[in-house]
Amino acid sequence: MRAKINRRTLETLPSALTESPVEPLSWLAGAHQDQLALCDSLEAIADSLPDEINRETCAYAAKMLGPTIRDLHAGEERLVFAWIEQRFPDDTSVHALLERLKYEHCEDECFAEELTEMLGRLGAADRTVNAETAGYMLRGFFTNVRRHISFEQECLRSMLVRRSGKTPC
């Protein structure tokens, strides 16, 4: 199932969990694209504060944010992390890295819950929402998600280069 926020399509249930097996890194690239699209949508909401808020977009973002993040993280952990663990079964540094990434997923999901509540209030035209605080929360979340994605991409690239014995490009 796919969802749209600000005309961007987001996958709400990772296809790798519901369809035939998918190559893990291809799936992860798609999951990263979906998360970055979500970040772009949240950034557009933050940029609209305080005077140009689209209440419908905020309400929809509140509905989609938590499930989207949880589903993408669950898919990543079940498909990609399991795939990595199979390739590096005795590498304690890889296992420590995956535990760190799982912890960051948990943090992002908790932050998404707080944003969901705030976005719901914005969508309902709750005038008690402080626009500066809302913008700060939104920017903190999407900045952190973008940083997490960049870190994952760099770490995975390094791990695969190390595994293949090739020098990095």
Image (tube, rainbow, N blue to C red):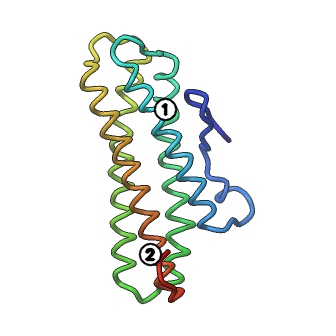
Q: How many marks?
A: 2
Name which residue lies at 49% across and 29% down.
Answer: 61
Along the line of sight, which residue is nearer the eye, 110 or 8?
8
Residue at (52%, 26%) from the top-left corner? 60
Q: Earlier in the sequence, mark 2 or mark 1?
A: 1
Instruction: Give the residue drawn at x 53%, y 53%.
Output: 32
In the depicted view, which residue is nearer to us: 53 or 105? Answer: 53
Mark number, residue 120 = none
Which percent across, then down, holds residue 8? Answer: 60, 34
Q: Rate crowding at label 1 as few (under 14), some (14 to 19) or many (20 or more) other CA atoms within 10 Å.
A: many
Give the residue at the far front of this rendering: 169
**Above or below: residue 10 compared with residue 19:** above
Relative side of 107 to 44, left or right: left
Q: Secondary structure at mark 1?
A: helix
The residue singled out by tag 1 in the image is 41
- Residue 122, x across and y down, in percent: 39, 18
Q: Which residue is mark 2?
A: 158
Mark 2 is on which residue type? Ser
Q: Nearer the viewer, mark 2 or mark 1?
A: 2
Residue at the image position 51 percent from the left and 42 percent from the top: 67
Q: Name above or below for residue 32 compared with residue 142.
A: below
Quarter in which the N terminus is drawn: top right
What amino acid is found at the position of numbered circle 1 in the picture? Ser
Mark 2 element type: helix
Depicted 8 relative to depicted 120: above or below = below
Residue 5: x, y in percent? 56, 30
Percent x, y of residue 52: 41, 13
Q: CA distance from mark 2 to mark 1?
A: 30 Å
State whether residue 108 is above or below residue 135: below
Q: Residues within 10 Å of mark 2 (few under 14, many from 20)?
A: some
